[in-house]
Image (cartoon, rainbow, N blue to C red):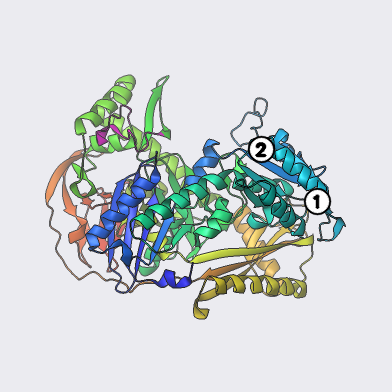
Amino acid sequence: MSMSSLDSALSIAVDIGGTFTDISLLDRANGQVWRAKTPSVPSDPSEAFLAGIKLALADAGAPASALGQVLHGTTVATNMILEGKGARAALVTTRGFRHVLEIGRQDIPRKANLYTWVKPARPVPASRIVEVDERVAAGGAVLSPLDEESVFKAAEAIRQMDIEAVGICLLHAFANPAHERRVAEILRAELPGIAVTISTDVLPVVREYERTLTTVLNAAVMPGVTTYVGRLEKRLEAEKVTAPLLLMQSNGGVAGAAAIRLAPALTALSGPAAGVVGARAIAAACGIHDLITVDIGGTSADICLIKDGKIGLTQHGKVGEWPLPLPMVDMVTIGAGGGSVATVEDATLTVGPRSAGARPGPAAYGHGGSEATVTDAHVVLGHLPSKLLGGRMGLDVGAARRVIEDRVAAPLGLSLEAAARGVLAIVDNHMVGAVRVVSVERGHDPRQFTLVPFGGAGPLHGCALADLLGISSIMIPPAPGVLCADGLLAADLKAEFSRTLPKAGAIDVQAADAIFAELEAQAEGWLVVEGVAEEKRRKARVALLRYHGQGGEIAIAWAGTREAVEQAFAAEHQALYGFTLDASIELVTLRVEATGMTAQPPSIRLEASKAFAPYDSTPVHFADETLNVPLVDRAGLGSGVVFEGPVILTQLDTTTLVPPGWHGSVHESGAIILTRHEGAAQ
């Protein structure tokens, strides 16, 4: 993959969600964008992938051969980990350390009962873990050479296990990967057709449990992701698409298909990252740098806080029950979306986390759905127009009313409208709780931020969430329902190069600078191989530090001097946890983040206009009254248009509900800025 592909004139991005697949086609030469949205096909995601590409190309009148780049956000690896459907894998480790996975860590889930919680079964049981004779010290010195005869015996043992993938994680390999690489070389020769992964290709840092777990999870998803990516490439080739395929990573950057085949775990939780990248880009065009993004799709809601235009990364992410300490966009995900199912049990109404998915979906979609969902509640209250997806998808209002009546209103003895409002109130409060996790619990006042709701359902909930949080400003992106696809188009090429120090200790700036120089040389080599032009190469130094005695680190930008580093660490610790300690600060790991900057297209500015002409109106049920609300096609709004709520803005990819008490204006970028009237009820 060459960086020149990142600058190609015609780029297409495909983001596959649980309910819909979103497509954005961009002409980087003039900034023109064509967008499409099509139902996802869970049984074969590649069907919706190709169908969406054809829709967008047809709208643009461009042949498939004109594409210079195909970008993709996928949840294949994430879903395999969450559902435990990865390949049957084995693990090779240093003799004496086969129980690292079983021992794990002492922590249990926050909501678990201390007395009844049962430790989940590990991705690879002890019966599929084999040992080899070797030993490397924490500093990288070889204490015992690799006994290759033990490796051949391990290969024979694995051959009898009927497995599809092997993970190799040797003690302290992050300090010296030579033994791991030799074991992999032997196993690939002895076990043809079996996927082999080594820890130092995925997570070359300290902590044996997390490194081992990440290695076996990477091994387990490798066959499935490799097959999926290969199928996409073949189907693209069959459609005369010769452009390279780039995939979204959890760190907010993209990588070539070859890199993802090697370390597919890098894509875990990558889907939501693209939306955050897109939201930041649109917000920056509006002069907004402090924002809270809320991506509400059909199945889940992903919440992220951006301060001073910087997207926070974390290495404390989890996928289901498993810690996955790979660099990923710092966000909170909850099971709350348009397809979230509302149920009544013991006179108690709950919403989510279970979703109706793409099939059958909400009852209003007319695919046989028989359970009440958040979308059905919106339909009952009149929040949605009669047709979606630019008129290609009609809504079954009668079906939505029936399921809300039968599943919610009747069991609770409520009116139809009160039941629908109850469903929305519960799901909104779930999301408010998640917003407070990324803001209040980390020392930020959400009232000082602009709320950016997106995803297919985001703009329906934006004003309600802002009211609950006390936020007075909302930005609705130009295409909220396909912002994850737009974000892919704005994403840069990214990779990380890390080294854990032989022994955590006091900050030695001179020694750290020497290691950083070596890591930067690796990063520079990678950027050259990827074909990144010199003026578009970026390298950032990051240090992971902790107080003496702590078990986890905090990542900060390397400040150059010991005093500056310690001050930056203390400030970040205060922001995250609300306190600092009178203790020595230890340097644990150094990291260089390499970036190949993507060429940004010319900005398209809307023409100025004052026209605000409703094409229809519809009755909408609010808390205290039913109002006849105008329906306005957002595509007809020009820069400078101002309007008052209540109003419903319709477009191909989403619907925006602006209730009474809010007024809006159209920014020249196409974004809509909503502001609450002073004194309006919250």
- Residue highlighted by disc 1: 148
Magenta residues, start to end: 355-372
Left or right, residue 635 beside residue 324: left
Q: Percent x, y for residue 353? A: 44, 35
| Disc 2/disc 1 C-alpha distance (Å) | 23 Å
Q: Percent x, y for residue 329? A: 52, 56
Q: Main secondary structure of the magenta part?
A: loop
Residue 332 visible to the viewer:
no
The mark lying in front, picked from 2 and 1, is 1
State which tag comes first along the sequence, 2 or 1: 2
User: Magenta segment: does it hold 537?
Assistant: no
- Residue highlighted by disc 2: 124
Q: Percent x, y for residue 394? A: 20, 40
Residue at image point 63% right, 58% down = 574
Left or right, residue 345 beside residue 576: left
**Between 275 and 577, which is closer to the camera in this rendering?**
275
Residue at image point 51% right, 56% down = 249
Report the amino acid beneath label 1: Glu
**Between 612 and 301, which is closer to the camera in this rendering?**
301
Left or right, residue 52 beside residue 609: right
Circle 1 residues within 10 Å: few <14, some 14–19, many ≥20:
some
